[in-house]
Amino acid sequence: MSGLGAYPRQGWFDPAGVRDAVARWLRAVAADAELAPYFIGVDRARLGGHLALTLTVALGGPAGDLVRPAAGAWRGLGLTEAQHRRVVDYLAGVLQALDVPPDAVVAARRAFADEAGS
């Protein structure tokens, strides 16, 4: 079982599991021919750190030093709403592949999809 699935009884997932999920997510997005150009020159470590914090909160974990939602993380990339939905679809796919419970996948999708309209 992955690090993400190791703590479902607590309602949130260990930091290593979240970092792994975010790394997989960013690799999937960066490998998408349509989305990859938006990541040229992006500090992926910084983006990944912010996404990991947002994902942790979305999955019911502690907020830590998260001050604002992930909207700011994606807004500067210039993605269209449809492209943003694809990014969120990649997240759902990664989480499902890691056996994250369906309700947690829905919560994560909601946290990142809510920013599309901002």
Image (cartoon, helix red, strand yellow):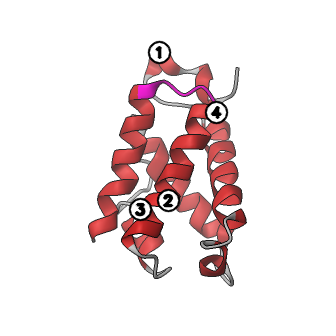
| Label 4, label 3: how far apart the Cα atoms are | 22 Å
**Along the polypeptide, which appears first: circle 1 or circle 3?**
1
**Along the polypeptide, which appears first: circle 2 or circle 1?**
1
Q: Where 1 falls versus 84 (above or below)?
A: above
Q: Nearer the viewer, mark 4 or mark 3?
A: 4
| Label 4, label 2: how far apart the Cα atoms are | 16 Å
Is residue 61 in view? no
Question: Which structural element holds mark 3?
Answer: loop
Count neighbours of disc 4 (C-alpha within 10 A) and say few if under 14, some if 14 to 19, many if 20 or more.
Answer: few
Question: Which structural element holds mark 2?
Answer: helix
Q: Nearer the viewer, mark 3 or mark 2?
A: 2
**Along the polypeptide, which appears first: circle 4 or circle 2?**
2
- CB within 8 Å, label 1 to label 4: no
- CB within 8 Å, label 3 to label 2: no
Task: Name the main secondary structure of what is drawn in magenta.
Answer: loop
* Residue underneath mark 1: 9
Please tell me which residue lies in front, 53 or 76: 76
* Residue underneath mark 3: 70
Q: Which residues are magenta?
A: 98-102
Tell me the number on the disc at residue 109. none
- The amino acid at mark 3 is Ala
Question: Which structural element holds mark 4?
Answer: helix
* Residue underneath mark 4: 97
> Where is the C terminus found, in terms of image quarters?
bottom left
Instruction: Determine whether, in the image, residue 69 is placed left or right of residue 14.
Output: left
- The amino acid at mark 2 is Arg
Residue at the far top in the pictured view: 9
* Residue underneath mark 2: 86
Q: Position of residue 87 (x, y in %)?
A: 52, 59
